[in-house]
Image (cartoon, helix red, strand yellow):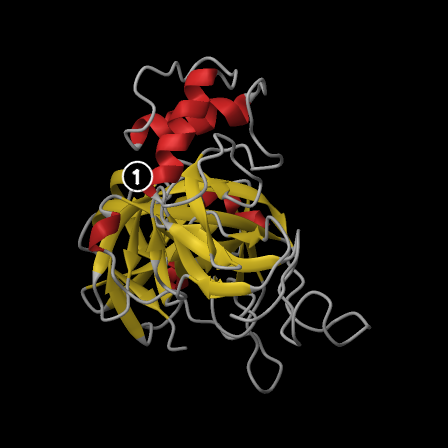
Amino acid sequence: MRKRAKWLLGSLAAVLAVSGGGYAVIAQPQRGAGGQEQREGGGLPPATAPVQRGDLSSGLQVEGTLGYAQERKLNAGGPGVLTWVAPEGSAVERDGRLYEVNGKAVRLMYGSTPMYRPLKSGDKGEDVKQLKRNLQALGYGTGLDPEDGTFTAGTATAVKRWQKAHKAAETGEVGKEDIAFASGPQRVRKGDAAVGDEPGPGKPVLTVTGTERIVRFQIDAAKAAAAKAGDPVTVRLPGGVNATGKIDSVGGTAAPDDKNGGAGGGGGGGGGGDQKAKVEVSVTFGKPAEVNAPDQSPVTVALTGETRKGVLSVPVNALLALAGGGFGVQVVEDGRAREVKVELGMFGNGRVEVTGDALKEGMQVGIPTL
């Protein structure tokens, strides 16, 4: 008797593994309760689905978390008692108060170099340039050259104007405890110290972030080829609202997931949790001002991946492993079923690209009842 083809999908049916953007299909025979191989080729299949022509995407859907960019701890610049802290969820812009120590405000200035020293006449460096740019932006530093990294007499005059505006002592110098530099406007995520605490130098007072909304998610390292910087994505927000964005960065390998409580949590022996290597990915929005869902909301990110235009495709579970090697589908026409050999292309969204001389759009192909 001629050996018949076997369904690829079912119990122990097919393994689809992603490796460097490609796919491998490993077929195993499906056996019935009595140990006999189930043979479907001679009769009609239990169900059918049409061969479709259209665009096929290898994109994925992954779960992510809505948050804010550039989270960091803001440490105290000097000793004292905390007398005021910006409330959680508030946004602080240039020259705004972040917190107060002994009744004296620590104000936000923009710049990438941290406030690591007092600034006074004669000092030179990138932090001096940052200070000058901020004084100019605030209207106190008219005539200053922001590209000159020297703290000049003109800089001291501008500092005194700034201090006068805030009813502070007009020293012409900026103490380490007077300002904090950050890349832009900051959002207070949480307070790490309470009013009345004595945080001291180097101790965290606030956890802050940028004000730009982003999504972070992890993807299996084996599937990381589906996420490339600059690729467009669609983010499904709470309430079913969709927002467009793009992949901002694809980071290094993250710690594997651990179902038992994190990378260091519980367990000690192997075998617990999902130990697949993960890659960190962040997404930015095309219109971030329109994203108003709560911080840390769960979201779904649809990755576009590769797209093939106008290809024939069938459901993945329509594939057969042919007895003579290769793959095929069971075409059902006029109440009869016949095997048609096909070549496989790209997989995506539960379908697979197929090509074959005898295959046409609209044909019905057999699929098993799973």
Whether residue 1 can be seen here: no
Image quadrant in which the C terminus is located: bottom left
Whether residue 80 can be seen here: yes
Number of numbered discs visible in the structure rendering: 1
Figure quadrant of residue 163:
top left
**Which residue type carries mark 1?**
Arg
**Vertical side of 134 occupied by 257: above or below:** below
Q: Position of residue 234 (x, y in %)?
A: 28, 52
Q: Is residue 332 left or right of residue 144?
A: left
Figure quadrant of residue 44:
bottom left
**Vertical side of 16 occupied by 259: above or below:** below
Q: Which residue is mark 1?
A: 308
Q: Nearer the viewer, residue 264 or 289?
A: 289
Q: For numbered disc 1, what is the local secondary structure?
A: strand
The residue at the point 40 percent across, 24 percent down is: 157
Q: Nearer the viewer, residue 303 or 309?
A: 303
10 Å neighbourhood of mark 1: few (<14), some, or many (≥20)? Answer: some
The residue at the point 20 percent across, 54 percent down is: 290
Q: Position of residue 93 (x, y in %)?
A: 33, 46
The residue at the point 55 percent across, 60 percent down is: 205
